[in-house]
Image (tube, rainbow, N blue to C red):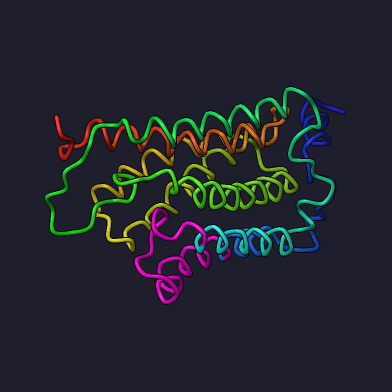
Amino acid sequence: MGLWGRWYSDIPGAHHVEPQTRSLATTLGLIGAAWLAADAGYYFALPLLTEPLSYNAAPTVIGLYYAAWIAIAVTAFRSLYRGWIPHENSIPAHGFIWTGIGALALFAVYAVPALPKIVWTETWSPPELMRVTPWYFLPKSIEILFQQLLIAATVFALSAHRVSIRTMSIGCALLFGASHLLLAFGGVPFGYVLRFVAAATAFGLLFPYLILRVRNGFLYSYGVHWLYYVVTIVMAHTFSPYVVR
């Protein structure tokens, strides 16, 4: 067995998916539809249930909403996840989990309130990342888990069809970046949307490699995904022209 064969046989989920049972285009289309439906529901359906709609003001509603989508994703793509173990039952894995939870909690409770204050002078509403509170981090953590599960399903589907890591990384970067264009529906100016898209594209390059090639890689992929938002929050409160100096 060649080098590719050794790698491919160790990819989680690859041996559980028969390419001929469902075309790759159909699988990717369903995954994309789930992502778009979740975002569409957030922007158009949830506002009917709670007002104002924000991670800060309605963390429980939004958290439950994305938890429901996690259940939908796990059920809809169970053939891709079958036999997959997101992380090992080991001290390093559990250490990473609890260290990450602790660091995020400390950042939310102590670092965020200490960031430079922002005085918003525009007529349109500011991006939510410019006015985060500790409550923001609860629903956002659930949403990121939902998105990471869809990313993992995409990676497993592509790996089952023997798509190269390089191609996966480029595709994942483009898709993850493009998905942030939906921020425009939240009233964010297009210039800000483009910044989020560029950053998301760069971070998206890492996901397939972490999930397929790194031990406990799903944990690191989730961590990198959260790091994207942490960096964005800090930058929004540091380099924004609305920061009080």
Return the x and y of residue 35 as percentages of the image width and height.
54, 60
Judged from this view, the residue extending furthest toward the bottom is: 48
Query: In the figure, is residue 166 to the left or right of 162?
Result: left
Residue 215 found in image quarter: top right
Look at 54% across and 46% down and name the residue there: 141
Return the x and y of residue 5 as percentages of the image width and height.
82, 32
Query: In the figure, is residue 241 to the left or right of 64?
Result: left
Residue 134 found in image quarter: top left
User: Which stretch is magenta?
Assistant: 34-60
Residue 2 found in image quarter: top right
Q: Is residue 56 magenta?
A: yes
Look at 40% across and 72% down and name the residue there: 47
Return the x and y of residue 199 as percentages of the image width and height.
39, 38
- Above or below 243: residue 196: below
Look at 33% across and 63% down and name the residue there: 185
Judged from this view, the residue extending furthest toward the right is: 1
Q: Where, quadrant-wise, is the N terminus in this rendering?
A: top right
Query: In the figure, is residue 237 to the left or right of 45?
Result: left
